[in-house]
């Protein structure tokens, strides 16, 4: 007599860290077969790792459902406002630093705080 088969459940936690520069592509419904619903957005990053004579392709896919798109758009707008408010130093030459003597982390923290306040003020 064999042991009974049980459908078990458990908690699985996986942590992986990878830092790569690669190709980033955005796709909407109808552009690929793996985007099932109108309004969904698929973000695909691809990188190739070469090890001697072997080439490994690493692909990461993130699908944002259409019903969750409002949250994504709000976060993207906030990031765009932060970048726009800080582009004067983000685009500045590193060989000619500005006059501001505050550390970059202090500037960034203050800029993010101001940008978040501005974002919420604009959207109320």
Image (cartoon, rainbow, N blue to C red):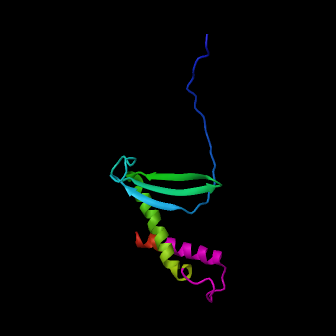
Q: Quadrant of residue 9?
A: top right
Residue situated in front as seen by the camera: 67 or 16: 16
115 is within the stretch colored magenta = yes
Q: Percent from the top left, x then y, of residue 98?
A: 61, 87
- Which residue corresponds to the image point at 42% horizontal and 59% vertical from the top-left? 26
Left or right, 49 with respect to 73, comes to right
Q: Percent from the top left, x then y, of residue 20?
A: 59, 60
Q: Quadrant of residue 123?
A: bottom left
Q: Percent from the top left, x then y, of residue 54?
A: 61, 51
Q: Is residue 30 above or below residue 10?
A: below
84 is within the stretch colored magenta = no
- Which residue corresponds to the image point at 61% horizontal and 78% vertical from the top-left? 107
**Count of labels in the image:** 0
Instruction: Identify the residue at the far top of this view.
Output: 1
Magenta residues, as a range? 91-117
Q: Percent from the top left, x then y, of residue 8?
A: 58, 28
Residue situated in front as seen by the camera: 52 or 32: 52
Q: Is residue 35 above or below residue 113?
A: above
Left or right, 17 with respect to 118, comes to right
Instruction: Identify the residue at the far bottom of this view.
Output: 99
Q: Is residue 46 above or below residue 118?
A: above
- Which residue corresponds to the image point at 63% horizontal and 85% vertical from the top-left? 95
- Which residue corresponds to the image point at 44% horizontal and 63% vertical from the top-left? 74
In the picture, which quadrant includes the N terminus?
top right
Left or right, 123 with respect to 79, comes to left
In the picture, which quadrant includes the C terminus?
bottom left
């Amino acid at each position: 007599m064999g042991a009974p088969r049980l459908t078990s459940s458990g908690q699985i936690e996986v942590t992986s860290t990878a830092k790569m520069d690669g190709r980033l592509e955005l796709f909407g419904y109808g552009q690929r077969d793996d985007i099932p619903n109108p309004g969904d957005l698929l973000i695909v990053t691809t990188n190739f790792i070469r090890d001697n004579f072997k080439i490994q392709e690493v692909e990461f896919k993130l699908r944002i459902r259409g019903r969750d798109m409002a949250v994504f758009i709000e976060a993207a707008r906030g990031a765009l406002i932060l970048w726009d408010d800080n582009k004067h130093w983000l685009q500045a030459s590193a060989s000619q630093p500005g006059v501001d003597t505050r550390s970059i982390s202090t500037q960034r923290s203050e800029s993010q705080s101001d940008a978040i306040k501005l974002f919420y003020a604009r959207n109320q």
